Amino acid sequence: MKDEDLLSLHYQIEKAEIKQKKLEDLLDEESDKLKKSKKSNRLFGSFSLVLFLLTIFLVANAFYFSKSQSKSGKAENNELSVIKKELASAKKELETLKKEKINLKEIKDLYLYRSLIKKDTVYSVQLKAFSAKNTPAISEKFTNALIYSDTSFYKMSLGIFETLSEAQDFRKTLIASGFDKRIFVISYKDGKRLKIEEFQ
């Protein structure tokens, strides 16, 4: 083996270790966010329960007083408007909680995805290679897209699958939907690319 090849291999290994460290830091950060979100979710759940019970109490109270004070129509209307405002407020709070639940699910999916990549062999379909100047920006919300660097190119793959057959089926679907026929399935283990898999 030439010194240039050894130097290139050493450089690739260093880059892979740096990338793995960044992914581990991201996973730790997301894990901390998940813990904080769970705590805030419990707090919001408790707050919603108290708010719901308070609303029921106020509705029952307003109903009781409206029965006893049936001669004053204005007081009834005022109580009704207060109850409507409280119900509207409770609905808004419920919508906020639903949105937070969706955000927690996204964080949980990212956490599960990252842990799957770290411990198991996974398969993905490589779509394209880019030079460093033409690397596309991919949002972190696309948890099933991977970009890794290899020599002077950045390579983008799509999909994370536990089995080779799932990845090959996904490759066929991508080709049928218009992607280049030269796309191929690659395997990863511990966050590192292993090899190009055979076509089926």
Image (tube, grey):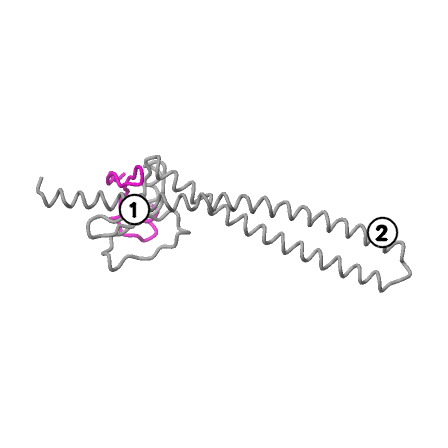
Is 10 placed left or right of 31 in the picture? left
Taking depth in this image into account, of 84 and 51 the one nearest to the observer is 51
Mark 2 burial class by Cα count in 10 Å: few <14, some 14-19, many 20+ = few
Q: How far from the left and from the top, in percent, is residue 35?
A: 50, 43
Taking depth in this image into account, of 134 and 7 the one nearest to the observer is 7
Point out which mark residue 64 bears. Answer: 2
The answer to whether the residues at label 2 and label 1 have Cβ atoms under 8 Å apart is no
Secondary structure at numbered mark 2: helix
The answer to if 75 sits in the magenta stretch is: no
Q: How far from the left and from the top, in percent, is residue 147?
A: 30, 49
The image quarter in which residue 162 lies: top left
Residue at 63% of width from left, 54% of height from top? 93
Residue positioned most to the left: 2
Residue at 33% of width from left, 37% of height from top? 165
Identify the residue under disc 1: 19
Taking depth in this image into account, of 175 and 159 the one nearest to the observer is 159
| Residue 171, placed above or below residue 85 | above
Is 83 placed left or right of 148 in the picture? right
Point out which mark residue 190 bears. Answer: none
Secondary structure at numbered mark 1: helix
Tell me the mark number nearer the camera, choosing from 2 and 1: 1
| Residue 47, placed above or below residue 85 | above
Is 91 placed left or right of 99 in the picture? right
Instruction: Look at label 1 and name its amino acid.
Output: Lys
- Write the start and end of the magenta stretch as one range: 173-200
